[in-house]
Image (tube, helix red, strand yellow):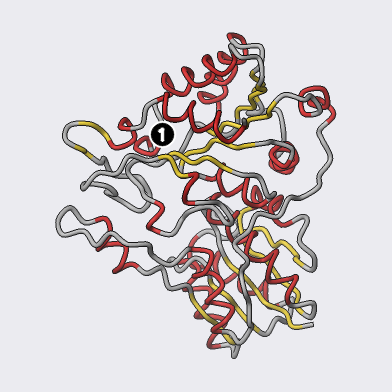
Amino acid sequence: MKRIIVTRFSAMGDVAMVASVLKEFQKQHDDTEIIMVSRKLFSAFFEHIPRVKFHAFDPKHKHKGLGGIYTLFKELKVYKAEFVADLHNNIRSRTLGFLFKIAGYRTQILDKGRQEKKELTRAENKIKKQLKLTTERYADVFRNLGFAINLSHTLQKEHRLIPTELLGSLASDKKKIGIAPFAQHSYKVFPLSKMEEVIKNLSETKQYEFFIFGGGASEKAIAESWEQKYKQVKNTIGNFTVSQELDIISHLDLMISMDSSGMHMASLVGTRCLSIWGATHPYAGFLGFGQSYEDCIQVEHSHRPSSVYGNKPCDCDGVEAIDLVSSEIVITRIQEICA
């Protein structure tokens, strides 16, 4: 077995994309074993991938600071790998990669295409073109290590068990729609009042079941309020593990997501995703693995995109970019897909 240490510490959506790449990589290389290094929460993404061993990265305690990175280096040396694939390219991963390099390991680091992304997101003289997909950038790291890999960029449905609590809902003949309405940055979030309009309108047809995903305590409160108002809505936030959330998503007919981890989790289990874009743009390369550009809901404007991550406002003639999208656009597209 050829053993490869793979590092991607965050964020959730990026780690899910790594999992999609590793699924295809391991199918094409039955003589490899992967040591995946990431935060413990994300281990569920790799449970169904053969010959992947997960090693938890703990940045707040055990692996904090330079001393913690050296501790991680010593832990990972035990696996006696030959290759290190840095799919993060941040200070921590580069430091770890440097330690492995001077120890004689073959190492490669992710090219994030920073200059191209600056040209896409700058305020003046934007160069608006499709950049290389992030998943292909990940694959390039393996190619540079000497491993051939051909990504299919197609959704592959995973067969998973339905959590007992949702057997009735997920086994019904209604169209099952997942909604991941939250994101880390507010400029990527479709206004929740509009999202509720989508739920209210489609609930009246009694043809749909909705499942709300993602977030913490405040987001859970919003999801629970929708659950109380609309009997077709089920809140999953705080009620299921990440692994169980993937189980649920695998049984959906469609996922509705921001440019966020919900889209990438849908890709991982082969579920089609209708994604909503505002300050960001699929041109930056973060469209979910196997998802279609035609399933991206966005209103083009010369000021878009303002950023790669959605952490900057995107003023489109006095309107924030995400507000250019109406609830009617989303409703119509869902009905077209689920007809």
- Which image quadrant is residue 284 in? bottom left
Reading the image, the residue beneath label 1 is 189
Query: Taking 25 as reference, is 264 left or right?
Result: left
- From this view, report whether residue 60 is shown above or below residue 150: above
Residue type, numbered disc 1 = Val
Residue pictured at 42% horizontal, 22% vertical:
194
Q: Position of residue 165 (x, y in %)?
A: 81, 25
- From this view, report whether residue 137 is shown above or below residue 254: below
Q: Quadrant of the N terminus?
A: bottom right
Q: Position of residue 212 (x, y in %)?
A: 60, 27
- Which image quadrant is residue 187 in? top left
Residue pictured at 59% horizontal, 56% vertical:
290
Query: Taking 105 as reference, is 93 left or right?
Result: left
Query: Taking 204 as reference, is 296 left or right?
Result: left
What secondary structure is marked by label 1? loop
Residue pictured at 64% horizontal, 27% vertical:
211
Q: Quadrant of the C terminus?
A: top right
Q: Position of residue 323 (x, y in %)?
A: 32, 30
Residue pictured at 49% horizontal, 26% vertical:
331
Query: Taking 39 as reference, is 300 left or right?
Result: left
